[in-house]
Amino acid sequence: MIEYDFSGRTAVVTGGAKGIGLGIAQRLAGSGAGVAVWDLDPGPVRGTEAGQGIEAAFSVDVTEPASVEQAVQDTLAQLGVIDILVNNAGVSGPTLPTWEYPLEEWDRVITADLSSVFLCSRAVIPFMLDQGGGRIVNVASVAGKEGNANACAYSAAKAGVIALTKSLGKELAQSGIIVNCVAPAMVQTDLLGEMTPEYIKTVTAKIPMGRFGTVEENAEMVAWLCSDACSFATGAVFDVSGGRATY
């Protein structure tokens, strides 16, 4: 594992109480970052072994502007700055054909997976601009590139995350703020519980390496994107897909 030095930097990880988000929070904290987790239920990292090294855990609804704004203020009050923002929070939604997809589920997935990235970035960027720089990493998905059948909302939301990443990368290119996203294939997390076994089998069969990705592999890519080693890549998509992605 490559060692990075994030000493003196503060990172916010949304949806950081479990899954990929927790893995990212632990990886950054392990390299010296002061990490704040924003999660609807931050309980799993408060006073637990999983939360060792994580300095703060706030109950935040990243789909609600007021909750996000309060989280920014709480994080700044406790940790002083926000140098890194990892927009990871999200849901997968049901696996149904588009014409059978419930309207309320469409709204829920788009809001949780795309609008949350907009809201958190919008709230944090002004402080990064005042500081003269920062890193934003968004967690998209290979589904946002390919459009998975029976996952219209998730695919559309993650495609939106990719496009938003590119827009922000261009807007902030000369500000010292670097913005990128990762596009994982299937990863072994609790989100699999929302998917049918048939869907999981179909998606896994598309991965040339023939296996799920791991939380640790995704966290390692995010750590590099948050580091000074990533200095000339912005508005870009970095696949963690086992060879699945074709562009």
Image: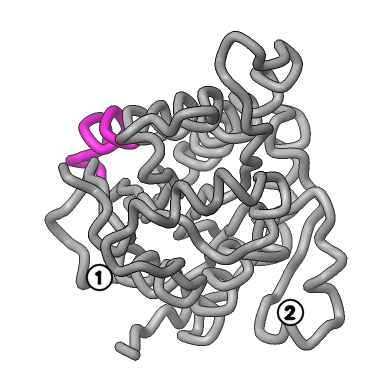
Residue placed at 44% from the left, 34% from the top? Answer: 158
Q: Which of these two is toward me, 16 or 102?
A: 102
Report, in whole angstroms, how far the alpha carbon at label 1 lies from the one at label 2.
25 Å
SS under mark 1: loop
The percent position of residue 157, horizontal first and vertical second, equals 49, 28
| Horizontal relation, residue 179 to residue 77: left or right | left
The image's mark for residue 228 is 1
| Horizontal relation, residue 65 to residue 119: left or right | right
Snapshot quadrant of residue 162? top left
Q: Which of these two is toward me, 139 or 153?
A: 153
The percent position of residue 176, horizontal first and vertical second, equals 25, 50
In front: label 1 or label 2: 2
| Horizontal relation, residue 165 to residue 65: left or right | left
Please state the total of marks drawn on the protein image: 2
**Vertical placement of residue 52 versus 158, above or below:** below
Residue range (magenta): 165-177
Residue type at mark 1 is: Asp
Counting residues from the start of the chain, the first of labels 1 and 2 encountered is: 2
On-image quarter of the C terminus:
top left
Crowdedness of circle 1 by 10 Å Cα count: few (<14), some, many (20+)? few
Snapshot quadrant of residue 142? top left
> On the image, numbered disc 2 is attached to which residue?
51
SS under mark 2: helix
On-image quarter of the N terminus:
bottom left
